[in-house]
Image (cartoon, rainbow, N blue to C red):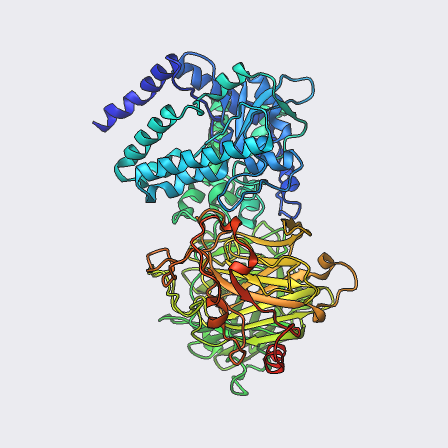
Amino acid sequence: VHREIIKGVIPKHKELQDKGQIEITTTPYAHPILPLIYATDLAATGDPNAELPRRFSYPQDAIAHLARSVQIYEDHFGGKPKGLWPAEGAVAQEIVKMVADADFQWMASGEDVLAPSLGLKGFTRDSQDTVQEADQLYRPYYVQYGDGSPVGIVFRDRLISDKIGFTYSGMSGQEAAADLIQRLDRIRARLKQQGAQGPHLVSIILDGENAWEHYQNDGKEFLHALYRNLSDTPWLKTVTPSEYLEMFPNQRKIENLWPGAWFSSDYGTWIGEPEETVAWNYLGRTRHALAQYDLYKRKETTPEALAKALDFMYLAEGSDWFWWYGADQDSGQDDYFDFSFRSLQKEVYRALGEPVPDYLDVPIISRKVVSPTRGVQGLSTVTIDGQVAPAGEWDQAGYYEVPGGDEVSALYYGLDAKNLYFRLDAREDWSALGDDVYAGIYFSLPPAEEANAFSRLSAGAEQKTLLGFRATRLAEASLKDGQVSAHLHLADGRNQWVKPVPLEGVAVAGNVLELAVPWELLGEVEAGEAINLVAVASAGQLDLTSVPSAGPLQMILPDLGAITVMLEVADPQEDDHGPGSYTYPTDPVFEPRVYDLEMFTAGFDEKNIVFRFKMFGPIHNPWGSPINLSVQTFDVYIDVDPGAGTGRRLLLPGRNAALEEGNGWEYAVWVEGWQQELWSSDETGQLFQVKTSYKTIVDPDQQMVTIRLPKSVFGEDVDPTRWGYAAAVLSQEGFPAPGVWRVRDVEATARQWRIGGAPADTNHTRIMDLAWPADARPTQEEILSKYPPSQEKNMDALTADDFAQVPLLGVPLANVDARRRESVKGG
C-alpha cells in the first residue's frame, strides 16, 4: 500500500500543476549550499570571524547542480521549472547569474537575507509579533548580476512559517488556523498604517517534513480549517510566485544580494567550526584530485568513469553532511553521516582507479567525550617530583579512574596560570613495563592548522591506535634505562609528530608520573576553548593502552585572567522561584537548582568588562548548543549614569520587569546557547543591537558562565565602577510566546515545557532568580511580586510601571534608606 501511495505522489502533483492549482519548484541536484560551492570565502561576509577552510571554489559544480535539477524536473513534469528553492534558501549575489542562465524566473530565501540586503539591522516585531517594516518584507524583488537576466526573489516570514512548522502542532487545528489568519490581518493593518501601496505578498515557506508527523491526524484538521479560512476571507488571495510576478511585474530591485540562508544572515550552520573546516578541507583535497581529470586534463580516464566520479563528487558536496558537523546540530548519529560523507569521496577515487588516501579513513567527528570521575574544580599548582605530596595538590584537578586494565590506573589533569599539568598513575611501578617506556598525553588546543589522528608509534604500523579526536599536541615522557625525559611535539597533519621541544617539568617515582607543559610553549590560547585529551602508554614500539579507551576527556579552559572585582553578590540558595511561587517544568531536563544563582560577579581588566554567573545547580547542554549551554538564559543590564533617568527602564522583551524609576539601562547583555548579543536603546527606548563580538566561557565543571565584553564597545575612558547593574537568570525557550525574546512562559501549573506558579495576570515576570543579596530589603520575592496585576494581552500597551521594579546593584539608589543602600553597595 505504501509503495502504491508513493508511486502516485509525483503524478498527482503533476496533475495539480497542469491544472494550475499549484506550482512545483526544484532544488539544486544534491542540495548543496550553492554560494559555498561557488567560493567558501563568501562565508566571511556574514561572519568575519568565522574559521574558514582552505579555499574551495568550483563554480562549474554549482552550475552542474542547477543543470541536473532542471533535467530531472523535465523528466518528471514534462517542462522546465520556473521557481528554485536554493538548498536551505542559501543565496548570494554571486550565484544570481548562474540561476538566471539556468532559466529560473524566481527563487526564494528568508527575511534574514533580505534585511541586510536592504541595509537594515533586521526586521522588528511588536509584542504581537507583527513585522513593523511590513512594506519591505511582504513583496518580491528582482536581483541581477551584471548584464544577466533578472531573477525574481521572495522572502519568507520566518515567524509565521515556523509557527506552522513547529508550534501549531500543539494547538487544535481550528485554533491554529484562526491564529494564522489573525496574524495576516495584523500584517494588513500594519500595511494600511504605513500607507503602503499593494498588493503585497506574504511568503510562508517551511520544512514540510518536519511538521506534519507532530500534528494530530497528520494535520488534517489544521489544513482543512486553513484552506477554508483562506477561501472565505475576502481580502486574501492565494497565489503562486510565478502568477504574482506575471500580474505585477514592476517590482523593486536589490542591488547586492546578501550572502545568507533562509534562517540566518550567514552560513554558520555549514561552515566556521573546526569540524566543518576539516570536512571542507577533505572535500577540497578530493575535488582537487578529480580536477586533474575534468578541469586540468592532466590525467585521462573513460567518459563513463569520469561521469561516475563526478556524480559521487556532487553527492559529497550536499549540504546535509556539513549540517551535522560542528556543535550547532546533533542528529544522535553524526558518526554515520561522517562515515557516509567520507565514503562518497572514497568512491570518487575508486571510480578514477586511484588509490584511496589514508585521510579518508580518519573520522572527522571526534568520539563522544567521556565523563571524568571528577571534573576540574579549580586551579592547581603542582610540584613536579613524582610524589603525591604535599597532600591536596591534585585535589582541584580533574581525573579519570580507569576501570580494570593492566597498565594504567588513573589520569589526572589540571592547570594554573603558568602550566598545564598531567599525572599518569600506573598499576605498578613504571619500570615494571620495561626499559623503553613512553607515556604520551595527546591533546587538542586551538589555534592549530594541523592535527593528527593516530598515536606517534602506531602511525606507520599496520595496527594503528586511533586517538578518537584530532590531536594538535603531544606531551610525551620517555623512560629509558631508569632515566626520564619529556618533549612537546606538534602535529604536522600527516600523522607525524614534529618539532620536539624539551620539557623540563617531568618526574617519575614508583607508579606516579607527573608532567608540566608551560602555556608559553602553546601560543595564545583563549579562555573557553575545549581541550580534548587522551593518554597512551607504550613499551618498545608497541602501544599498550589508551586512557580513556572509549573517547577523549575534555577540559574547558577557564578564565585565567586576573580581574578587579567591583561587585560580588552572594545570592541565597533555593531562591530560584522568581517571586516565590514558581516551580520548574516537569521534564527531567530541568534538573534541580539549574536556575539557582550562587554568585554574581562584575569586574574588569585592562581590556574587558567581565561578568560571572556561578550556579548552585548544573550547567549542561541537552539540546546541543554551540557554546555548551542550553537550559539557562543570563541577562545583565548596565546603567552608565544611574539616577539620571536616562536609558530604557523595561528589560528585554518578555522579561516582564523594569528598572526602578530614575534608572534606565544603556546596554543589555543577553547570553544563552544560541544568542550572545549586546543590545542598546535610543532616546525613545527603541532597541537596537550593538554589533560586536564578545567571549562567553561556559565551564560545566565549575558550574560557571563568564562573559568578557571589550571595554572599547562602551567608548573611551569608561569607568565601570560608577555604573549600576542588574542581573537575572531565566529559562531559555526556543519557541517563545509572541513578543517574547526566547525565555520560557510561566503558567498557573507546571507542565513539561512550562514553568508553574504564575498568578492570574498577564504581566508577571519570567525571571527565575535575580542577583540580589540575602540581607537586602526588599527581598527578591518582594521585588518580583510587587506590581499592578493586569489582564492586558498586548504588552506594548503597558508601561514600565506596570511590571516588577528591579533595583540596581553597585551604586547608591535614589530614595532608599541608608540601611538598604549599604546592603546593596556591599553585595
From what the image shows, is residue 702 above or below residue 57?
Answer: below
Nearer to the camera, 399 or 226: 226
Nearer to the camera, 87 or 537: 87
The N terminus, quarter of image: top left
Q: Is residue 591 visible?
A: yes
Q: Position of residue 288 (x, y in %)?
A: 59, 33
Nearer to the camera, 738 or 607: 738
Q: Residue at x 57, y 77 (%)?
A: 380
Q: Position of residue 501 (x, y in %)?
A: 67, 65
From what the image shows, is residue 253 above or below residue 261?
Answer: above
The C terminus, quarter of image: bottom right
From what the image shows, is residue 58 above or below residue 474?
Answer: above
Q: Residue 719 occupies which quadrant of the picture?
A: bottom right
Q: Residue 698 occupies which quadrant of the picture?
A: bottom right
Q: Residue at x 51, y 25 (%)?
A: 65
Give left or right: position of 347 versus 384: left
Q: Position of residue 791 (x, y in %)?
A: 42, 54
From what the image shows, is residue 638 above or below residue 147?
Answer: below
Nearer to the camera, 753 or 767: 767
Q: Residue furthest left?
A: 1
Q: Residue at x 62, y 67 (%)?
A: 725
Q: How many marks?
A: 0
Q: Position of residue 597 (x, y in %)?
A: 49, 70
Give left or right: position of 76 versus 496: left
Q: Is residue 457 visible?
A: no
